[in-house]
Image: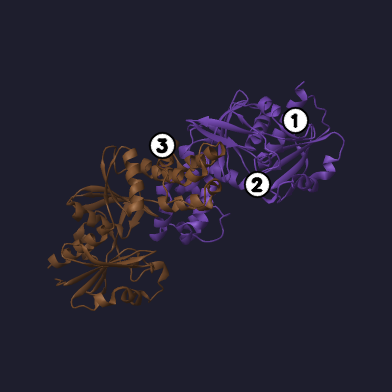
Chain colours: A purple, B brown
């Protein structure tokens, strides 16, 4: 179908938050709103009302269209959007939108890849990567999207041709708060990064060969008074992010890696990538709006 | 001091349980008792009373001596016993006992090692390894002691000359019960090992290069209906134990590895080691009594 979109509304609907934006012709946000109504807080059937609460006024405008990316398209979300197999570019993704209301509310599909018979999936990150391609005017890149489940993504000739998931953020949180390691760490102040301890953690991760082994050093260094309690969380953060860098197979030393993340995580990955001899280049949360805009443009161009 | 011990009482006092035994001249248990009063349940000053409850009758015998191994010797235990630096044999360990009552109640010290400036420690496992040496009549071995914090230990010329800790059991429990992976696994039945899923987990661990990456496959395989909910915990167990095997640097393929563990964990490690091409040889919980007996003999022989 050929689209005549006057007002594009971007919806970034993850498990823990909902962000909406009015997006202009250039793919930039004119106005943004956010709410804590992530998909995990939304019951079956409640999605239309929650979106209406967030941006019903925008949706009421003539020829408005909302494009939704993120976990709203999962089996536990609003309606299930497909996993498009890699390699996939704008066109494959745009042609597989799951329409809640045709031409008015569409959900961006996720991507799947297979390696050694093992599937991997992402949902939401495809849009951010497309946005980064548009923002940086590239058709080829290696990107990392840090988070609860960190994604490494490779793009060639404008299409995502491979990716891998690392449970970095989730494992960090479990070790930080629920494991024996928590006992020798201060309970607060994690937002204050101790860069020296963080880099010591990265170094240790590179040498230990496995986080199962490396992680115990957070305890023993503390037992031997070699790691102050206030630096424990930074050291552990370095251990876990360092483990991700050690085992990713997407970027060699000296490669440029696009980091798509909010400020705090971007800072840590920038530091870690430089420390590992790579060249980080950061793109912020506007990547989602830019990506949704590029998908919308693809819809218009499709006869 | 030269000891005249008539009755040796072995005390295996870990964080979650207390086991006591009357040990004969050959290092075998004549009588065993156990209680849930692990060190974590024992407040400061309560250790004498708890031990008295467990085996006061034995301690009251003439020339009885209790040797205690495990976390009772830690900073949060009864009294702190040293960490003896590796390499360490029976003699170093016996000469560094921490005596609660000289000649009557002694606590076996732990061991420490340093690698790349990072310390590692164990406490209790030294006694089990000494016991395995005595039981198997060896002076050289590579052992694994699976558990919350799994230990790999190398013995040469009768002395422990290196070891490493892997947080295998703890990380398994966190991923199994507290992570996103729990959502696609049956909540019960973990004691029923699905050997095929377990070995698939080991294979995946060997290829993934990091548990951070490999672990996510437990979710995606399930999303794609390739891993039944009832097999999820066995697969994860294989992933985590496989990661330990992949990254340990103590045993090469075809090497003999002594597994010192209770029945259920021994079975899993035996299977995993065979699957990885190594030769497991199992020793059970009697290793502790045999080790304490060997340390007691060392005391007698020391002028």
In the picture, the quarter occupied by the N terminus of chain A is top right
Quarter residue A110 falls in: top right
Nearest-to-viewer mark from 1 and 3 = 3
Residue B257 percent coordinates (x, y): 27, 45
The residue located at (42%, 35%) in the rendering is B207
Tell me if B131 is positioned left or right of A182 in this view: left
Residue B5 percent coordinates (x, y): 16, 72
Provide the residue designation for mark 3.
B203
Is there one chain holding both mark 3 and mark 2? no
- The outermost residue toward the top is A303
Helix, strand or loop for disc 2: loop
Provide the residue designation for mark 2.
A15
Q: Is residue B14 above or below residue B52?
A: above
Label 3 packing within 10 angstroms: few (<14), some (14-19), many (20+):
many
Q: Check the residue under mark 2 and report the chain it is in.
A: A
Provide the residue designation for mark 1.
A296
- The CA distance from mark 2 to mark 1 is 23 Å
The answer, for residue B115, to whether it is visible in the render is no
Label 1 packing within 10 angstroms: few (<14), some (14-19), many (20+):
many
Residue B136 percent coordinates (x, y): 19, 51
């Amino acid at each position: 179908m050929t689209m005549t979109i006057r007002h594009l509304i971007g919806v970034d609907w993850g498990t823990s938050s909902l962000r909406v934006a009015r997006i202009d012709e250039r793919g930039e946000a004119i106005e943004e709103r956010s709410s804590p109504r992530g998909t995990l807080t939304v019951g079956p059937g409640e999605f239309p009302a929650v979106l209406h609460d967030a941006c019903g006024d925008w949706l009421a405008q003539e020829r408005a269209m909302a494009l939704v990316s993120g976990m709203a398209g999962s089996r536990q979300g609003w309606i299930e959007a497909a996993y498009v197999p890699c390699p996939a570019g704008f066109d494959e993704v745009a042609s597989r939108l799951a329409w809640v209301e045709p031409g008015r509310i569409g959900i961006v599909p996720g991507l799947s890849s297979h390696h050694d018979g093992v599937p991997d999936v992402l949902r939401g990150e495809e849009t951010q990567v497309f946005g980064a391609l548009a923002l940086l005017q590239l058709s080829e890149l290696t990107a990392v999207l840090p988070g609860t489940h960190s994604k490494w993504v490779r793009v060639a000739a404008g299409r995502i041709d491979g990716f891998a998931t690392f449970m970095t953020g989730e494992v960090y949180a479990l070790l930080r708060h629920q494991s024996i390691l928590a006992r020798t760490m201060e309970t607060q102040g994690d937002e204050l990064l101790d860069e020296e301890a963080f880099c010591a953690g990265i170094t240790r991760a590179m040498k230990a060969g496995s986080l199962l082994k490396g992680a115990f050093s957070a305890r023993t260094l503390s037992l031997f008074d070699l790691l102050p309690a206030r630096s424990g969380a930074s050291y552990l953060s370095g251990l876990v992010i360092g483990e991700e860098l050690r085992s990713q197979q997407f970027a060699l030393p000296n490669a440029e890696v696009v980091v798509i993340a909010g400020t705090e995580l971007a800072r840590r990955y920038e530091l870690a990538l430089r420390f590992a001899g790579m060249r980080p280049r950061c793109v912020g949360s506007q990547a989602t709006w830019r990506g949704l805009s590029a998908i919308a443009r693809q819809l218009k161009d499709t006869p």
